Amino acid sequence: MPQAVVLFDGVCNLCNGAVQFIIERDPAGLFQFASLQSPAGSALAERHGIDAAALDSVILIEAGRAYQRSDAALRIAAQLHGWWSRLRWLRLVPRPLRDWIYDGVARHRYRIFGRREECLLMLPGWQERFLS
């Protein structure tokens, strides 16, 4: 079992870009991924009491616990290589403010970044990072 699983909106260009970004900065392979539209992703979300049809948040499943919205994003960033790990300090910002900003981006992500109809393009070596 991976250390952590990131559940994401598989048709969102921003979300797919975030997955690519994480993979490129996670050489140790701490994270695995599943789209919320996939059977594995929706089952994992349901197991943690999250409605997989509500595609407005990235979800991080770590140590048996589910994190959403800005909590998930900052916990992911804290484990990435490079200066991204310094973003963990943003957890000092009150969650309502962080989530308000997160929700604003999430609400307009399709309009700003677009949608895709096909799955994320898998580069060599990425297949084992995705739950099936």
Image: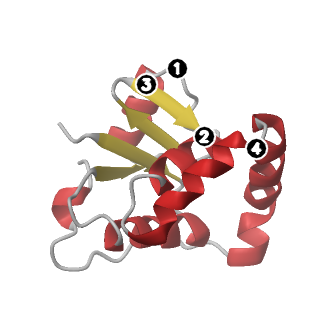
Q: Quadrant of residue 23?
A: bottom left
State if disc 2 and disc 1 touch (CB < 8 Å). Answer: no
Q: Residue at 37% across / 50% down in the picture?
A: 34
Which image quadrant is residue 87 in?
bottom right
The disc, 4 or 1, on the residue closer to the chain's N-terminal end is: 1
Q: Earlier in the sequence, mark 3 or mark 4?
A: 3
Give the Cα separation between the discs numbered 3 and 4.
22 Å
Picture quadrant of residue 119: bottom left
In this view, the mark in front (3 or 4):
4
Disc 1: which residue: 49
Mark 4 lies on residue: 93
Question: What residue did someone put label 2 on?
Answer: 71
Amino acid beneath label 2: Asp
Task: Decide which of tag 4 and tag 2 comes sooner along the chain.
Answer: 2
Indicate the secondary structure of the residue bearing disc 3.
strand
Instruction: Choose between 77 and 5: the one closer to the eye.
Output: 77
Q: Amino acid at mark 4?
A: Val
* Residue 66, percent from left and from top: 48, 29
- The label shown at residue 65 is 3
Which residue appears at 83% of the width and 46% of the height? 100
Sequence-wise, which precedes: disc 1 or disc 3?
1
Instruction: Label 1, secondary structure: give it.
Output: loop
- The residue carrying pointer 4 sits among few (fewer than 14), some (14 to 19) or many (20 or more) residues within 10 Å by Cα, namely few
Image location (x, y in percent) of residue 107: 79, 56
Binning the other alpha carbons within 10 Å of mark 1 as few (below 14), some (14 to 19) or many (20 upward) gives few
